[in-house]
Image: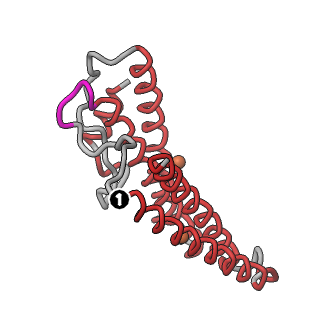
Amino acid sequence: MLRHVRDHAARPDRVSRKGTLTMPSQPSQPSGLSVWDAELLKHLTEHLETEADLLASYQRLTEESQSEYVSYLMALLVEDEARHHRLFGELVNALRAPVERDVGTMVPTVGTVANPQELLELTNRFLEAERKDARELKRMSRGLRLMRGLSLWPLLVELMERDTEKHQTILRFIRGRVRDQLR
Ligand SMILES: [Fe+2]
Ligand SMILES: [Fe+2]
């Protein structure tokens, strides 16, 4: 399975010319993983493979599309997929880290923070800003109703609304951990 990772690592141009993708650094099957972790690693690696192919196809359409709006939208997709790909690579690295040296950037574990009170106030403030952002985007979205399907504007505003949801999810995660710590 890990052969695929090696194949990709040998052809980094296949997925990104900007070098935004992080591949798992040690492409050989590590010994010492539990059956569970080895199975998880297999799934993640398979996903990396599928996603890399998809990403390459998206990228091709971005570059070769004869239509500016299609290229523009596909470039947005490529950005997201490149990030997904990086995250999967960092999950793989985290799995390998206990049994290998120098795996590269990995997903960190959740621990305590040095300044919980300060961080709690900060995340509350950020959450308020994100909620305000969401209200403004909603207002914009209503204003753009008549342009739906005719222009990219309503679509982009909708995507930003979804991003704002995501940002709140991230901030609520941090706030939850900090609250636990302060208990
Ligand atoms: Fe994805
Ligand atoms: Fe945001």
Query: Which residue is depicted at the point 41% across and 14% down?
Result: 35
Q: Is residue 152 above or below residue 183?
A: below
Query: Which residue is depicted at the point 43% across and 54% down?
Result: 83
Residue at the farthest right position: 146
Q: Position of residue 8 (x, y in %)?
A: 32, 40
Residue 102 visible in rendering? yes
Magenta stretch holds residue 100: yes
Q: Identify the image quadrant of residue 19.
A: bottom left
Residue 71 visible in rendering? no
Residue that label 1 marks: 115
* The one of 51 and 113 positioned closer to us in this rendering: 113
Q: Callout 1 environment at 10 Å: few (<14), some (14 to 19), or many (20+)? A: few
Quadrant of the rendering where the N terminus is positioned: top left
Query: Which residue is depicted at the point 59% across and 72% down?
Result: 128
Q: Amino acid at mark 1?
A: Asn
Q: Give ligand 2's quarter of the image.
A: bottom right
54 left or right, relative to 97: right
Magenta stretch holds residue 162: no
Query: Which residue is depicted at the point 35% across and 48% down?
Result: 14
Q: Position of residue 137 (x, y in %)?
A: 67, 78
81 left or right, relative to 67: left
Q: Position of residue 43 (x, y in %)?
A: 47, 28
In the image, is the residue at mark 1 within 8 Å of ligand 2 by its beta carbon?
no
Helix, strand or loop at mark 1: loop
Residue at the farthest front position: 183
Q: In this picture, which residue range is highlighted in magenta?
A: 97-102
* The one of 60 and 52 positioned closer to us in this rendering: 52
Q: Position of residue 67 (x, y in %)?
A: 57, 73
169 left or right, relative to 91: right
